[in-house]
Image: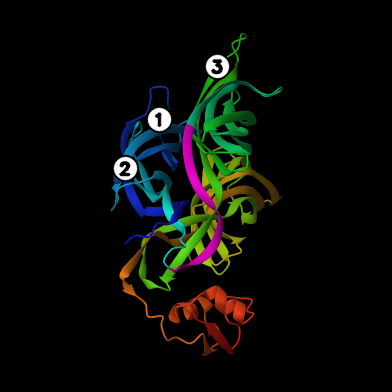
Amino acid sequence: MELNCNRQTVMINKVIFDGTAEQGIESDLMLADYCPDVVKILRCCVNPKIEATTVSGSKITIDAVAQIKIYYLTEQKTIRQHSLSIPFQKQCDFKEPVTGSPIAYVHPKLDYINCRAISPRRLELRGAVSMEIKVLCVSNEEAVCEADELGVQLKKDIVQSNQLSGQVNSTFTVQETLELGYGKPSIATVLDFRTEATVSDCKPIANKVITKGDLHLDLLYYCSEGKLQKMEYSIPISQIADMEGAAENSECFVCYEVINTTLEPKANLDGEIRNLMLECKVKCTVQSHSKQSYVHISDCYSTQHECSCVGKKSEAAELIQNVENIYSYKQSINVPETVGEIGDLWCSIEDVTVTKEEKKILLGVKLSICMIAFDTDKVPELFERTEEFTHEIAVDKNTSNMMFLPIAFPVSVSHSVLAPDRMEIRCDIMIKGCIYNIEPLNIIKAIEVDTSKQKEIKNRPALTIYYADKGESIWEIAKHYNTLMDGIIENNSLQDEILSDRCMLLIPMV
């Protein structure tokens, strides 16, 4: 018969998918009429962005876009940049259907890209993007927490954890009219621009999370004299995310990600191009964590009858650490002999790998450094190199079962010339993400007692002497002798449930 037990609600987080997917990137494109002809392709870079993820039934659908920039040299010995976006969709199937609220982690990276000029106005692109995908399901389970009939004994542990409880993604659009700074020459042609969004504050309230941050824009343009000019802008942004269950004591992780940006130069009343119309699509991701305390039942027995536990295997994702720190990269590098003047320098993150060691996580970061420079004849060239470094994150627990999907992006880049052939590069890199400990969890759903099989309790001595070894469990001893664990502890004045030394125990019978 199933015992009538008291139950409690336990939040569980089960990983239902952990894999990778690949997506090809192909395009045959013609330059617009206003673009000059291609003489030489200098660089092609791809920045894949995840716009939305949808989990339904037993599959995940990923809507993404590959943002592509092609830098090339023109007949006029200037550098131009052509941008395009290639949307794509990818689906992956699960082995089991979703039964709770899904939380999807998708981290894309570029595998390779090849770009060649078929003609001065026609380009061919071939490449591939891979995506690391993890899907968790958050659900509530009813678990046994108390039973006091038919001599049933429960092995109880009080569990306190801070668990992932939900995730929401929302997008918002930033529209601004920007002006060139005082003393800056007007715009002839925009060469390039880069946007990044950072979070400065978040505040959870009842079922909502208020987020604030800044949108950073770096502009690179040619003035009418043919010289490169730079401008930097910082625009305050904010977003209110609807998060069911969020409260003031919730711990939240928030990330902004720029999905798409358009920048259109505009002339002012004097006919000079000194204004810029900015429209930027930003995705806001909010993850909420809830503290829960519950009684975990790991075993049971009855002093009167044969009994057994009916369990369900699951997992719990406990938040170990909310990472948000800046790594300062500094490196001295050689400058090519042909460089006479540096026009611009920027950095981007190509890949981040995670290696787990004892009580620490090592991030292997691949940093791409790009530089537009001019030789002594004022002919521009684009130089690129890749640097790799390791960033260590210390954790308090063993990392064997940990999950960490970091987000990394540069927040500032600067350089200084040390000598005609040497320069120093400084790049501050924001590293964000949540470190979770994924532990197996066995939920006791019911206790079944076979009242037809009564245990023999007659003719047993009131006390039994038992010689225990170091490391033995009082629970296992009580279960073996079919008695009460609390009785053994009380009769032998024990402090712990695990014996620290060999000893003689008096086992009281019931």
Tell me the kind of residue under disc 1: Asp
Query: Which region of the structure is painted magenta?
Result: 151-170
Residue 175, position as x, y percentages in the image: 55, 22
C-alpha span from label 3 to label 2 = 38 Å
* Amino acid type for the residue under numbered disc 2: Lys
Mark 1 or mark 3, earlier in chain: 1
Question: Crowding at label 1, few (<14), some or many (≥20) Cα neighbours within 10 Å?
Answer: some
Residue drawn at x 37%, y 77% is: 455
Asked which colour scheme the image uses, the reply is rainbow
Upstream in sequence: badge 3 or badge 2: 2
Closest to the observer, 331 or 440:
440
Find residue 254 and report its horizontal and vertical position in percent: 56, 41
**The N terminus lies in which quarter of the figure?**
bottom left
Residue 266, disc: 3
Question: Looking at the picture, which amino acid does disc 3 mark?
Answer: Lys
Look at the image and say whether residue 160 sits in the magenta stretch.
yes
For residue 323, side relative to residue 257 (left or right): right
User: In this view of the protein, can residue 421 be seen by the observer?
Assistant: no
Q: Nearer the viewer, residue 242 or 465?
A: 465
Labelled disc at residue 507: none
Q: Is residue 305 above or below residue 45?
A: below
Q: Is residue 333 left or right of residue 164?
A: right
Q: Which residue is mark 1?
A: 37
- Above or below, 229 relative to 377: above
Extreme residue toward the front, this view: 459
Residue 317 placement, left or right of 132: right
Along the polypeptide, which appears first: circle 1 or circle 2? 1
- Give coordinates of residue 287: x percent, y percent: 52, 43
Q: Are marks 1 and 2 in contact (CB under 8 Å)?
A: no
Residue at numbered disc 2? 90
**What element does badge 1 sit on?**
loop
